[in-house]
Image (cartoon, rainbow, N blue to C red):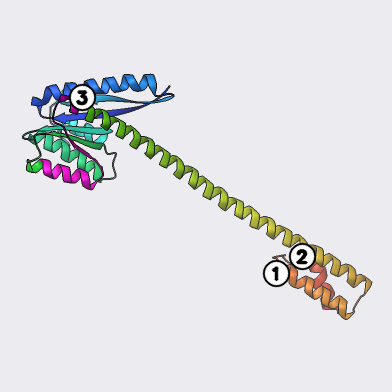
Amino acid sequence: MKTNHYKIFLAGSTKLDSERQIIKAVVSEYNATVSLHNGSIADLYQVYTYENFDSVIDSNTGQTAYNLFIKNESDLAVFVLSGQIGEKTLKEFDVAYESLKSNRKAPALFVLSNNADNNEEVVRIRKCLEANGEYYSKYNDVDELKQKMRDMLSKFSARKKQEKNQKIKKVFGGSFVILLIVGLMFGLWGIKKVEYNNAIKKAEQALEYYQQHPKTLPAYNKLKDALDLLEKNGVGSEEPVKQKIERQLKNM
């Protein structure tokens, strides 16, 4: 079975430990279910939280190790909000959101909110997500939190599948255009080659007619027409048949 591995950074207040444990359990359940029932391709997720990282501030960037992970490594950043939002959580969201707007690798964003809709920062976060096609959803209890998380994983998997299909179509579309252009070039080259050969043939026929009817007006006209056809089709002066026609015309 082919597997696509995605990294989730799970952010939120340290007081929401039970919610984080619930989400981790949902992800584990999802991984097991997908592995058993999703045919030849499975999307598997690994959850990371602040506990996985060193809390020491990086002296070069001024960001914590997990902020760097959100920005550079995570495929999906999930934020669980309830009541007041801590400064670190807001910083983590801003890092993910700014990365999303830049040209760097950026995580998809999903926010689950409980009893925080009146918070000014939550309103700002919701508007940011809605403006960029990301996910914001409210939950009222544990069961709803579980279902929202399952829905999010399904949406994200569908989103990644669509992105891959679009890339494939773009690659094949580009290849088709290239093949079409090459085909047209070869087609035009082939037509040009046929016209070139026809011009040579007409010239040889004109010379043959001249040998049978030397220094006559019809012979002159045929030689002149043959010369015009040779020049029209790019036959150079190095071509022997053209040289012969030019000599005969000079002698008439």
Q: Residues within 10 Å of mark 3 (few under 14, many from 20)?
A: many
Check if residue 211 falls in the magenta segment. Answer: no
- Marks 3 and 1: which is nearer the front? 3
- Marks 3 and 2: which is nearer the front? 3
Q: Residue at x 82, y 73 (%)?
A: 223
Judge whether 125 appears above or below 222 on screen: above
Of 34 and 170, nearer the camera is 34
Q: Which numbered marker is on residue 199?
A: 2
Task: Tell me the quarter of the picture where residue 233 sits.
Answer: bottom right
User: Mark 3 — residue?
Assistant: 23
Q: Residue at x 56, y 53 (%)?
A: 181
| Residue 245 appears in the rendering | yes
User: Which quarter shows the N terminus?
Assistant: top left
| Dots 1, 2 in contact, CB < 8 A | yes
**Residue 31 x, y percent position in the rendering:** 31, 22
**Drawn side of residue 243 relative to residue 123, left or right:** right
| Dots 3, 1 in contact, CB < 8 A | no
User: Start and end of the magenta stretch?
Assistant: 122-144
**Drawn side of residue 81 relative to residue 203, left or right:** left
Q: Amino acid at mark 1?
A: Lys
**Drawn side of residue 55 relative to residue 107, left or right:** left
Q: Secondary structure at mark 2?
A: helix
Looking at marks 3 and 2 on the same chain, the residue that comes earlier in the sequence is marked by 3
Of 189 and 4, nearer the camera is 4
